[in-house]
Image (cartoon, rainbow, N blue to C red):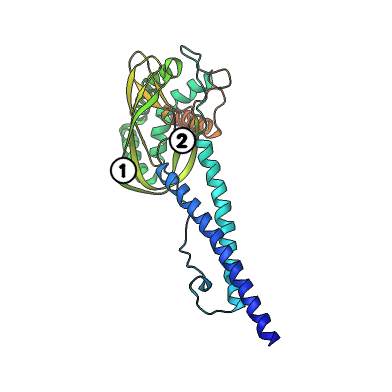
């Protein structure tokens, strides 16, 4: 009789414990669902959620102490896992809600490192595409074709190509450098997003959070965000940002012309320091891409020069 009483007491205790664990898990799941809605809105992958069925004790189904203890451990483990993921994502959302650092009114000085990064942006855009194998097979024959007419023709074509490449790069940099010198941070009045039919899978894209810009993989549909912003002087500008994740960065707008750009569209990844001036430090990836564009251009020019000199020596012999 006492043995039966003890077993019944253990079963009731186990039932109470598993119901308590399940109730705690349900509370965490509700918090995760609320955070997931904010993450999806911000273009961030949500926290994975499973379907958690209530324990047999909740519906009066007979069970055993061992089964109840196993379910309690499972519920507790899931609550701990989701709680850890929740804390991490809440810190991400808190970081995104951080006020944008102030930028003093222009005109302001543009650091030399920013100028270097912006001037080399166009050249790097070409080399980045040219290094992608499908485009390499298309671009290489075009660059090599003039060499079949002779070394001088090939060198002249290469010189013309490099001049055109850097000319376009310099022309494109003018707008960005003007905005860095005179642009004002715009207040977003309206925001609309349109998704393309292109699905990206672990593709490196720029993620924005205020002035912070990070290069991270993204999986999902590409999108174009159209922003209507107003400068402190009342100028209205419209800016389109093409990226994968939702844009949460800063827009610089020219108070005179109304031209504007998102901060992720600048090669220099600009951000102000504590004084409201531009922080001259560049991210490592920006230094790498800017230097690679210069090195690649010098390598092409050097190779063309060597070939021409070698051909002249052979003719002299």
Q: Position of residue 152 (x, y in %)?
A: 36, 27
Of helix, strand and loop, which one carries label 1? strand
Task: Determine the CA span between mark 1 and mark 2.
Answer: 18 Å
Q: Determine which of the numbered discs, if any, sits on residue 195 in the image.
A: 1
The quarter of the picture where residue 20 lies is bottom right
Please state, as top left, top right, bottom left or bottom right, where the C terminus lies in the image. Answer: top left
Label 1: few (<14), some (14–19) or many (≥20) C-alpha neighbours in 10 Å: some
The quarter of the picture where residue 149 lies is top left
Q: Is any part of residue 167 visible from this angle? A: yes
Label 2: few (<14), some (14–19) or many (≥20) C-alpha neighbours in 10 Å: many
Q: Position of residue 151 (x, y in %)?
A: 37, 30
Please state, as top left, top right, bottom left or bottom right, where the N terminus lies in the image. Answer: bottom right
First in residue order: circle 1 vs circle 2: 1
Q: Is residue 32 above or below residue 232?
A: below
Which residue occupies the foreground of this view, 222 or 114?
222
Q: How many marks?
A: 2
Which residue occupies the extreme right position in the image?
A: 2
Q: Determine which of the numbered discs, if any, sits on residue 34 in the image.
A: none
Q: Is any part of residue 314 visible from this angle? A: no
Q: Position of residue 291 (x, y in %)?
A: 51, 30
Which residue occupies the foreground of this view, 218 or 36?
36
Residue drawn at the location 47% of the way across and 67% of the way down: 53
Residue drawn at the location 47% of the way across and 62% of the way down: 50
Q: Position of residue 44 (x, y in %)?
A: 45, 45
Residue drawn at the location 68% of the way across and 80% of the way down: 6
User: For mark 2, what is the residue?
Assistant: 208
Q: Is residue 181 left or right of residue 221?
A: right
Which residue occupies the foreground of this view, 95 or 256?
95
């Amino acid at each position: 009789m006492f043995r039966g009483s003890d077993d019944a007491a253990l079963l009731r205790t186990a039932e109470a414990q598993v119901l308590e664990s399940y109730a705690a898990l349900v509370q965490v799941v509700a918090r995760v669902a609320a955070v997931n809605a904010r993450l999806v809105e911000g273009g961030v992958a949500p926290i994975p959620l499973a379907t958690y069925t209530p324990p047999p004790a909740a519906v009066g189904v007979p069970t055993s102490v061992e089964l109840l203890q196993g379910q309690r451990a499972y519920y507790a483990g899931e609550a701990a896992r989701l709680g850890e993921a929740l804390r991490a994502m809440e810190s991400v959302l808190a970081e995104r809600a951080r006020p944008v650092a102030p930028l003093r009114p222009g005109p302001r000085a543009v650091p030399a490192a920013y100028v270097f990064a912006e001037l080399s942006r166009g050249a790097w855009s070409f080399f980045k595409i040219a290094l992608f194998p499908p485009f390499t097979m298309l671009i290489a024959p075009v660059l090599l074709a003039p060499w079949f007419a002779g070394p001088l023709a090939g060198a002249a074509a290469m010189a013309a190509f490099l001049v055109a490449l850097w000319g376009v790069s310099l022309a494109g940099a003018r707008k960005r450098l003007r905005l860095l010198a005179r642009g004002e941070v715009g207040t977003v009045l309206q925001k609309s997003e349109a998704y393309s039919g292109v699905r990206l899978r672990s593709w490196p894209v720029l993620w924005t959070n205020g002035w912070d810009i990070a290069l991270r993989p993204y999986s999902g549909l590409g999108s174009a965000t159209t922003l209507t912003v107003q400068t402190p002087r009342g100028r209205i500008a419209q800016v389109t940002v093409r990226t994968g994740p939702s844009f949460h960065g800063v827009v610089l707008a020219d108070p005179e012309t109304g031209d504007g750009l998102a901060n992720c569209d600048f090669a220099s990844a600009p951000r102000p320091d504590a004084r409201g001036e531009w922080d001259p430090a560049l991210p490592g990836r920006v230094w790498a891409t800017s230097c690679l564009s210069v090195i690649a251009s010098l390598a092409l020019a050097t190779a063309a020069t060597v070939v021409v000199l070698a051909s002249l020596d052979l003719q002299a012999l």
